[in-house]
Image (cartoon, helix red, strand yellow):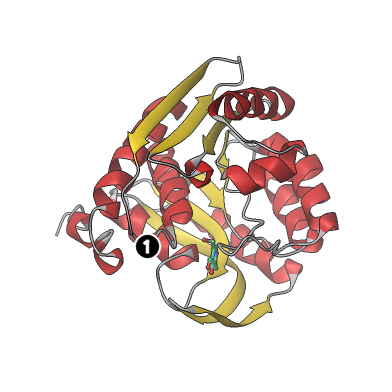
Amino acid sequence: MRTPNLKQTPVAMTVAGSDSGGMAGMQADLLTFAANGVYGVTAMTCVTAQNPEGIAKLEVLDADFVSEQAKALNRYFAIQAAKTGLLCNREIIDQVADFFISNPSIQLVVDPVMVSSSGARIISEEAIDALKSKLLPLAKIITPNLDEAEILIDSPLKDPDALERAAKEMASKWNATVYLKGGHLGGERLYDISCSPEGESRSYSQKSIQSIDTHGSGCTLSSCITAHLAKGEGSLASIEHARDYLRKGMERPVFHRNAPFINHFPS
Ligand code: PXL
C-alpha cells in the first residue's frame, strides 16, 4: 500500500541517529521535514543520551535493524527522497548502501557526518572507506563541512580557492552535486560552494552570524534540501531553499529554529 492517507504530501526518510536533546540528528530532521511541508519517516542508527552540553552515552543499533526499518517504510510509503546522517560503522553503511542500490528512484542526500563539533573523528577509518566507496557514489547531493571535506579528499583546505577545487573534485569523483560548507574557515564571512556533477560551481558568501549555537545546523540544512527534493524541486533550487531556511532559523534562539515554520499541514 502506498500512502493512502497522505495523498499529496511528499514523504522523506532520514537514516540518522537520535539526539535526545532534539537539536541535531533525526529530531532536527523531522522538525525540518514538517516545517517544509513534508511527512518524515525514520530509520534510526543509534541512540544518544545527550543534552546541549554534550553526548553522555551512545548506543549503536544492529545494521540489520537499520536496514529493516528502511525496508518496512519503503513497503508502505512512497519515499521520494532520503538523507543519511550519523551512520556510525561500516556494517550500517554497507546495509544502507544496499538499500539504496535496490531503490534507485529515491533521491539520496548524504550528509557525511564524521567529525564532532570538537573536531574529533566519530566514525572509524573502515567506515569512512565504506562511505567513500559504497554510499557516496549513490548520492544526488553531498553536504560535507570543511573538516569532512578534508577527510574525503585527503588534503587540507585553507582558503576559498581550495574549497572550490575540493568541491569540484568531489562532484566529479562521485557524480553528485556537492554543497561544501566552508563555515569553519573562520573570519568575518562564511564561504560555501556548490558544484554540480558537470563541474559548474557557485560560491555563496555571507556575513557570519556571531555567537550563535550551530549545533544541528548541518542536519537542518541537509534535511531541508531533502524535503525540497521530495517536493520535486531540482538540486540547486533545493539548496537555495535550504540556505534561506537555515539563515532565518539561525537568527533565532536554537530551540526555535524550526518552530515558527511548522504550520504547513492542512487540518
Ligand atoms: O550534528 C551531527 C550529529 C548528527 N547526529 C546525531 C548527533 C549529532 C551531533 O550531536 O547527536 C545523532
Badge 1 residue CB within 8 Å of ligand 1? no
Q: Farthest front residue? A: 187
One can see residue 169 in this view: yes
Q: Image point 48% across, 45% down: which residue?
A: 186
- Could you tell me residue 230's position as x and y percent? 42, 40
Crowd around label 1: few <14 · some 14–19 · many ≥20 (10 Å):
some
Q: Image point 42% across, 67% down: which residue?
A: 27
> Which amino acid does the dot numbered 1 rest on?
Asp
One can see residue 106 in this view: no
Question: 35 left or right of 111?
Answer: left
> Image quadrant of ligand 1?
bottom right
- Could you tell me residue 106's position as x and y percent? 56, 40
- Could you tell me residue 144's position as x and y percent? 59, 43
Q: Nearer the viewer, residue 110 or 117?
A: 117
- Could you tell me residue 169's position as x and y percent? 69, 25
Q: Nearer the viewer, residue 49 or 206?
A: 206
Q: Farthest left residue? A: 267
Which residue position is annotated with label 1?
213
Question: 203 left or right of 199?
Answer: left
